[in-house]
């Protein structure tokens, strides 16, 4: 359904370090530069960071979340730890499994250095 997701950031190089570490925990290589943007290409889509082209400050969306698929709870824990080690802050409940109407899922939530809410999500086999 999605071709890519792009987030606005205020400090491109700080955010690159954050996302290089975070997405590196998922086996995705460092961001590839293209003008004022970095692109991260994975097997199921593209994620990008950019400074806003209109010159205004980047702001996070209240109520917005970007979810990254992880292959296991351990990979989700590594994602979360990498984010914390590179300027992210934890939010919501601690990383772990939750039961909901769609069954058992693993979630690990963070805010990136600009306040964007991101998470790792794993759906174990039933």
Image (cartoon, rainbow, N blue to C red):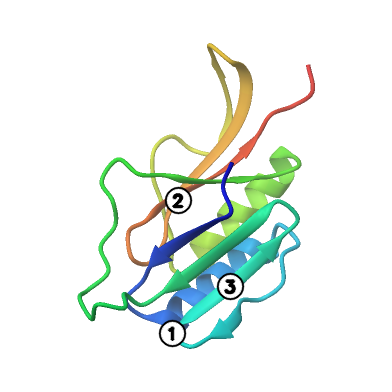
Residue at x 51%, y 70% (from the top left corner): 18
- Seen from the viewer's position, the closer of residues 52 and 80 is 52
Q: Identify the image quadrant of the C terminus.
A: top right
Location of residue 24 with respect to 110 vertically, above or below: below
* Left or right position of 99 against 62: right
Q: Which mark is residue 39?
A: 3
Mark-to-mark CA distance, 2 and 1:
24 Å
- Seen from the viewer's position, the closer of residues 28 and 96 is 28
Provide the secondary structure element on which disc 2 rests.
strand
Residue at x 48%, y 88% (from the top left corner): 35
Q: Which mark is residue 36?
A: 1
* Left or right position of 30 against 6: right
The mark total stands at 3
Q: Which mark is residue 110?
A: 2
Quarter holding residue 70:
top right
Mark-to-mark CA distance, 3 and 2:
20 Å
Mark-to-mark CA distance, 3 and 1:
10 Å
Q: Earlier in the sequence, mark 3 or mark 2?
A: 3
Q: Position of residue 111 (x, y in %)?
A: 40, 55
- Residue sitting farthest toward the right: 125
Q: Earlier in the sequence, mark 2 or mark 1?
A: 1
Instruction: Assess whether mark 2 and mark 3 are in contact (beta carbons under 8 angstroms).
Output: no
- Residue sitting farthest toward the left: 56
Q: Position of residue 71 (x, y in %)?
A: 76, 42
Provide the secondary structure element on which disc 1 rests.
loop
Instruction: Assess whether mark 1 and mark 2 are in contact (beta carbons under 8 angstroms).
Output: no
Q: Position of residue 78 (x, y in %)?
A: 66, 54
Q: Position of residue 83 (x, y in %)?
A: 53, 61
Residue at x 27%, y 69% (from the top left corner): 58
């Amino acid at each position: 359904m999605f071709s890519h997701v792009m987030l606005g950031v205020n400090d491109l190089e700080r955010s690159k370090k954050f996302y290089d570490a975070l997405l590196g925990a998922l086996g995705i290589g460092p961001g590839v530069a293209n003008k004022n943007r970095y692109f991260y290409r994975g097997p199921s889509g593209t994620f990008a960071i950019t400074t806003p082209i209109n010159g205004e400050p980047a702001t996070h969306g209240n109520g917005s979340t970007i979810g990254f698929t992880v292959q296991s709870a351990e990979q989700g824990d590594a994602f979360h730890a990498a984010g914390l080690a590179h300027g992210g802050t934890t939010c919501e409940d601690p990383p772990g499994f939750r039961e909901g109407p769609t069954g058992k899922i693993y979630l690990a939530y963070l805010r990136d250095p600009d306040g964007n809410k991101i998470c790792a999500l794993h759906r174990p086999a039933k």
